[in-house]
Image (tube, grey):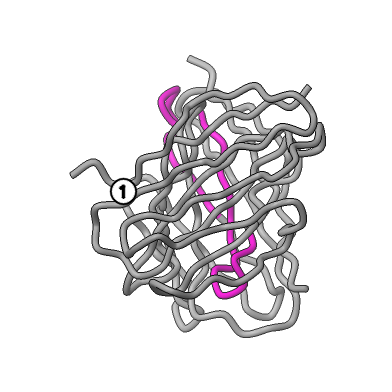
Amino acid sequence: QQQVKQSPQSLIVQKGGISIINCAYENTAFDYFPWYQQFPGKGPALLIAIRPDVSEKKEGRFTISFNKSAKQFSLHIMDSQPGDSATYFCAAPEEYIFGTGTRLKVLA
Amino acid sequence: NAGVTQTPKFQVLKTGQSMTLQCAQDMNHNSMYWYRQDPGMGLRLIYYSASEGTTDKGEVPNGYNVSRLNKREFSLRLESAAPSQTSVYFCASSEGRYYEQYFGPGTRLTVT
């Protein structure tokens, strides 16, 4: 079964810093690479997604970058804020697979 | 719009007891899903329903059954609960952009 490997497991960043989360996938073709955000006690919600024919997509402070040759896509959170503290999941939606999650804490 | 609703929010069961987790969505979505979330394991698909009247097994279906009652409702049943089923259960739905799943708030289940 297809796997997505997410790293790091946890991340602590100072307010205003850059948070970077990576997701590696195995050899298959996906139509979309999404990132989900989950706050404590809530269900996950789609944050941003990218198609594989695009190398980068930016929405506000959140950017997805896609490296097809490295089979990796990354989430960058610029100017990280305490309100960004949450768990982030990448996913392989065609196979209903989610990464194991990265718990981000942004210190005030 | 309430989106995806789940009941109950919390439940404690004894080993061997049965229960049904309820899920409903008001977005007219065709596809619905049940996941379980365990620490360090991410979300794992239990069952999904691509449309009313169809259900398919996911990654971890053992010990569970599902019913797609109608387009709005998708229930998950534990026939004989086991401690290994202690988890947080999420229902989700999607339509069109299949990679965009809408999740409910979850049910936290403890089996003692």
Indicate left or right for A28 with B67 as reference. Answer: right
Q: Residue at x 60, y 62 (%)?
A: B47
Write down the residue under mark 1.
A60
Tell me residue B88's x, y (percent): 61, 35
Whether residue B85 appears in magenta in the rendering, the answer is: no
Q: Residues within 10 Å of mark 1 (few under 14, many from 20)?
A: few
Q: Residue at x 63, y 56 (%)?
A: B65
**Above or below: residue A94 compared with residue A38:** below
- For the image shown, how many numbered marks are present on the structure? 1
Indicate left or right for B75 with A12 as reference. Answer: left
Tell me residue B15's x, y (percent): 79, 29
Q: What kind of residue is marked 1? A: Gly
Judging depth in this view, the residue of A12 and B109 nearest the camera is B109
**Above or below: residue A9 compared with residue A4:** above
Whether residue A83 appears in magenta in the rendering, the answer is: yes
Tell me residue A48's x, y (percent): 41, 57
Which image quadrant is residue B59 in?
bottom right
Over which residues does the magenta segment extend? A75-97
Judging depth in this view, the residue of B38 and B33 nearest the camera is B33
Q: Residue at x 71, y 53 (%)?
A: A6
Q: Secondary structure at mark 1?
A: loop
